[in-house]
Amino acid sequence: MREYLAIFGIALGVTYLLASIARLIAVRVGAQARVRDRDVHAVPTPYFGGPAMLGGLFAATLVAERMPFLGAADATVFHDVRAILAGGALICLVGVVDDLIELDALTKFAGQVLASVVVVALGVQFVYLPLPGTFIGLDQAQAMLLTVLLIVGSANAVNFVDGLDGLAAGIVAIGAIAFFVFAFILAVENGETRAIAAAMLTIALAGVCLGILPHNFYPARMFIGDSGSMLIGFVMACSSISLTGQFPPSSLAQGVGDADASFLPALLPLLLPFMVLAIPFVDMLLAVVRRTRERRSPFSPDKMHLHHRLLQMGHSHPQAVLSMYAVAGLVSFGIVVMSLLSGWESIVAFLVLIVLTAVAIILAPKLSSKVGP
């Protein structure tokens, strides 16, 4: 665990330092977010948070390779990490180009698919579909299609939700920590090695997301841009895919402790990216339905995202972001706890927290208006 905490610290610190350099480069080359009608920022703000975060991931990996415990891990562990970082570098590059010249939706989508195919070609893909008590083997075509679908969906979901300062980075940081907890406990309880690519990537991902937040939280001095939002969604999805490849089907189907009576442990590696990114995925789905019904392109912009609705309810910018953090934490850690602990108590506690979170989000604008500025 100490080596994982060291990776977290390295990723956080390197990202924080690189962000200052990246911001200066973005200003010099003109990679800045213009002020548009649908935006909430009032002045042009530099991009390039993505390259800083990618640098933090690479730095954490280089340090991990030289650590006593993680450095002695099986070769497949770092093979998966390098493969995912290779794909991540490609999708980050696509985002950098988009931040500079604003690519059309089809070109950006092609870049996302290409980055996903690179990861599959390097051997990181689903080899079976985990189900309660059993698993279904996948042929090469099925495995590639499912893998690419999950990766591209996650990258776009995070990209869609990246509309308020610090929102995407904070949500993914929460999800990454929850996934790390699940992967680490799963390894411990099943007697597997603690040195696994999924744990290494998610703890580093949490570090880079928290490292960028001092620059990206309201009022943001820089944006992570498409290069950052697509990168962190990409790494999150690839981490779950890697987890299924490094655990035997019996371990995932059995789950942890007494949780084998539940269907969640078996399906969690497949569902967790969707659950921890529930807000981005719901936001993306609603946007696609809304725009399709209006006979517009699903990628056409508007001001009807979930974060826009919170602002319309009367939330301040920070309140809206913190509200979505609360929901992300509730869903992410709630689903992990329910997968690790069986019994009605965990379900009841989860439902109570849902009600309390909903009440807090609804009442926050009213309470702040009474308190005053």
Image: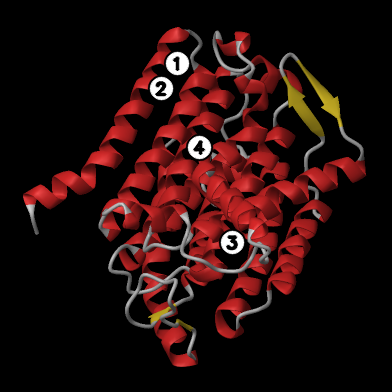
Dot 3 amino acid type: Met
The residue under label 2 is 350
The residue under label 3 is 230
Dot 4 amino acid type: Phe
Dot 2 amino acid type: Phe
Residue 5 drawn above or below residue 247: below
Q: Position of residue 213 (x, y in %)?
A: 35, 60
Residue at the image point whose x is 53% and y is 62% from the top: 229
Query: For the residue labelled by badge 2, is the local secondary structure a helix, a strand or a loop?
Result: helix
**Image quarter of the C terminus:** bottom left
Mark 3: few, some, or many residues within 10 Å (few <14, many ≥20)?
many
Q: Which mark is residue 180?
A: 4
The residue under label 1 is 347
Relative to 308, is 115 on the left or the right? right
- Give the foreground label among 1 and 3: 1
Q: Position of residue 348 (x, y in %)?
A: 40, 14
Mark 2: few, some, or many residues within 10 Å (few <14, many ≥20)?
some
Q: Which quadrant of the structure image shows residue 77?
A: top right
**Pointers 1 and 2 in contact (CB under 8 A)?**
yes
**Pointers 2 and 3 in contact (CB under 8 A)?**
no
Give the mark nearer the N terminus: 2 vs 3. Answer: 3
Give the Cα separation between the discs numbered 2 and 3: 30 Å
Q: Visible in this render: residue 248?
A: yes
In front: 80, or 217? 217
Relative to 106, is 286 on the left or the right? left
Give the mark nearer the N terminus: 1 vs 3. Answer: 3
Give the Cα separation between the discs numbered 3 and 4: 20 Å
Give the Cα separation between the discs numbered 4 and 2: 20 Å
Q: Which quadrant of the structure image shows residue 137?
A: top right
